[in-house]
Structure formats: C-alpha cells, structure tokens
Amino acid sequence: MSGYFFSVSADSIAFYQPPTQLMLELHGGYQQAAAGLFNGGQVDAWGVETLIYRVEEILESQGGKLPAPGEAASSDALLFQVSDLWLDGSNEITPEALESAFNQLTDRLSYSPLSLTAQETIAFCYLVFLREMTHHLRISHIRYQP
C-alpha cells in the first residue's frame, strides 16, 4: 500500500509513514471532540453538527502540514467496530461508503435522537472522524489492517 497509517485515539490523532515513523500527531481525539455532546447515548442533530465542527478544528489545527491525499490504513479496534456496525464488516472502506453510513444514521435524526449504547456512541464519534478525514485529507481509500 502506498500512503500512510493513522490512529485516532480518545485524545489524539497520529499519522505514520510505513512502517512506524511518526509523521504528525494532532492533539484532540474522539473523546475530546464529543465531550458533553451525547450524554446518555442520545445523539441529536445539534450534537452531530458540533462534533463535525470540533473534528474539523482538530484536523485544521496544523494548517497545511497534514499528510498528502491518497490511501490510508489503520489497525484501530474502533475502525473494525465501525466497519462491523455500519459498513457490512468490510476491511476496505471508501469515502462513499462512509458518507452513505453517516447519511443513513443522521437521516434518522429528523424524526428523533438516536439512542446508542456507550460503545456505539464512541464508534459513532470515530465514524465522524473518519468521514471528516476523508474530506479534509482527501483520503481515497481506508484499509483496516489488524
């Protein structure tokens, strides 16, 4: 695979040049981005919009120093969980698949908030991170590599 590896944790995002050379680490992860938004697993439209804004702020915090567009891979357990929950278990993930999964979930918000378990809420926040990474970093393909 040409491209880079990434890992999104509760409090940071790290980008690596294969195999393990750290290229960049951004402060702020899924837990920080979602802080105070989805209490009790209730996901509403305002919370999603705020989460997107916070993720964008994290991704743009380094200016133009982000990895080049292209393919990316990760061994994050949350990537596996997102894939299992909302992407039919695929290890090969496209921006279109992420967008479709995101839209299917958020379309339901026009009727009522989503009720998610604590772990599903974390996975949802990770999904939003992935979606925004494909937009802002122009990732063309994500591969889950356990």
Image (cartoon, rainbow, N blue to C red):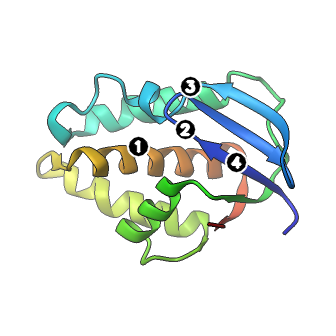
Q: Horizontal placement of 104 versus 83: left or right?
A: left
Identified by mark 2, the residue type is: Ser
Tally of numbered discs = 4
Residue 75 in percent (x, y) is at: 62, 58
Q: What distance separates the C-alpha of mark 4 from that of mark 1?
A: 16 Å
Question: Element at badge 1?
Answer: helix
Residue tagged 1: 125
| Residue at image point 40% right, 70% down | 84
Q: How crowded is mark 4: few (under 14 residues within 10 Å), some or many (20 or more)?
A: many
Residue tagged 2: 9
| Residue at image point 87% right, 54% down | 18
Identified by mark 3, the residue type is: Gly
- Contact, mark 4 vs mark 2 (Cβ under 8 Å): no
Residue tagged 4: 6
Q: How crowded is mark 3: few (under 14 residues within 10 Å), some or many (20 or more)?
A: many
Label drawn at residue 28 = 3
